[in-house]
């Protein structure tokens, strides 16, 4: 049986992707760039700055802005995003997650969060599940964002466990790559992992017992 589990946040515990989409779409419109939800998929699990670069690349505008201007654009997006996530409550937990967290706690399995989001702690607080986590990665202290191993490696060290003692859960290719680079087994939600699931409903304690 595994001793620990490392969760991604957006797309695994709650679905903030739509709020990221709305905030980025509004910001992009202001600088003459339009994109749809299909393109938004390519931003999942990717850091704020890298997301901005990918949006600017749609119109080859990457060199049009200075670093300071890009930081201002990313800040503006984040301020709009923070307003949107302000109304998140425990009702926004994805199906099965609360039961799984309770089962993990009851069985002394350590729990970590490995999100690329600098808003992760605020979102956990809104969801009212912060106390379940033994370790929460601080994305602002991670040198190389997903797909680099740093995020999941920091979570692994934070739990004080070895790679073969934990499992990582992700909904984005960038995150699955980060898990793989740490030699951790992965569960992909709507994305290919060592184990692939179609919904968090299938992510049960009984399933974890079989790994
Ligand atoms: P922030 P995850 C990621 O969260 C999101 O999937 C991604 O779309 C976002 O750009 C990134 O966090 C950074 O978020 O702007 O709040 O710091 O999937 O790693 O939990
Ligand atoms: Mg995610």
Image (tube, rainbow, N blue to C red):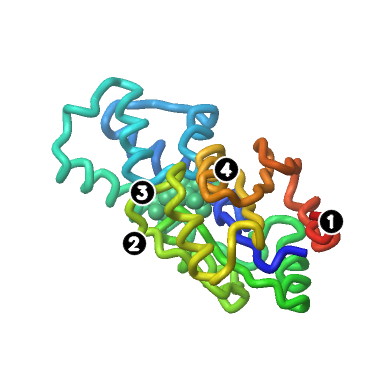
How far apart, in angstroms, are the residues tagged by discs 3 and 4?
15 Å
Q: Is residue 19 visible?
A: no
Dot 3 falls on a residue whose secondary structure is: loop
Give the mark, 1 or 3, whose residue is nearer the N terminus. 3
Circle 2 residues within 10 Å: few <14, some 14–19, many ≥20: few
- Asked if ligand 1 lies within 8 A of label 3, the reply is no
How far apart, in angstroms, are the residues tagged by discs 1 and 2?
34 Å
Q: Residue at the spot x=85%, y=60% of the render?
A: 206
Question: Which residue is labeled 1 in the image?
Answer: 210
Instruction: Find residue 189 and report its image quarter.
Output: top right
Observer-nearest of 7 and 178: 178
Question: Which residue is labeled 2 in the image?
Answer: 141
Asked if the residue under mark 3 is in contact with the one under mark 1, i.e. CB atoms within 8 Å, the reply is no
Position of the C terminus, as image quadrant, is bottom right
How far apart, in angstroms, are the residues tagged by discs 2 and 3?
9 Å
How far apart, in angstroms, are the residues tagged by discs 2 and 4?
20 Å
Give the mark, 2 or 4, whose residue is nearer the N terminus. 2
- Say above or below: 47 vs 90: above
Give the mark, 1 or 4, whose residue is nearer the N terminus. 4
Give the mark, 1 or 2, whose residue is nearer the N terminus. 2
Question: Which residue is labeled 3 in the image?
Answer: 144
Q: Residue at the spot x=28%, y=51% of the render?
A: 75
Instruction: Find residue 194 and report its image quarter.
Output: top right
Question: Which residue is labeled 4 in the image?
Answer: 176
Q: Residue at the spot x=75%, y=41% of the render?
A: 198
- Say above or below: 180 vs 136: above
Residue 24 image position (x, y, % from top left) = 39, 40
- Asked if ligand 2 lies within 8 A of label 4, the reply is no
Circle 1 residues within 10 Å: few <14, some 14–19, many ≥20: few
């Amino acid at each position: 049986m595994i001793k620990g589990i490392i969760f991604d946040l957006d797309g695994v515990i709650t679905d903030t992707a739509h709020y990221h989409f709305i905030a980025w779409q509004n910001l992009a419109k202001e600088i003459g760039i339009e994109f749809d939800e299909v393109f938004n998929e390519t931003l999942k699990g990717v850091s704020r700055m890298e997301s901005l670069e990918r949006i600017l690349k749609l119109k080859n505008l990457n060199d049009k802005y200075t670093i300071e201007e890009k930081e201002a654009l990313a800040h503006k997006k984040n301020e709009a995003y923070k307003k949107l996530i302000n109304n998140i409550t425990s009702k926004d937990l994805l199906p099965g997650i609360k039961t799984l967290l309770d089962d993990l706690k009851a069985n002394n399995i350590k729990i970590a969060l490995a999100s690329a989001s600098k808003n992760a702690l605020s979102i956990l607080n809104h969801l009212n599940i912060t106390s379940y986590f033994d370790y929460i990665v601080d994305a602002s202290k991670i040198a190389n964002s997903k797909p680099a191993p740093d995020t999941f490696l920091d979570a692994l060290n934070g739990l004080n466990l070895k790679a073969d003692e934990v499992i990582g859960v992700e909904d984005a290719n960038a995150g699955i790559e980060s898990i793989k680079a740490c030699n951790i087994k992965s569960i992909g939600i709507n994305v290919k992992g060592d184990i692939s699931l179609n919904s968090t409903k299938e992510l049960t304690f009984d399933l974890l017992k079989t790994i």
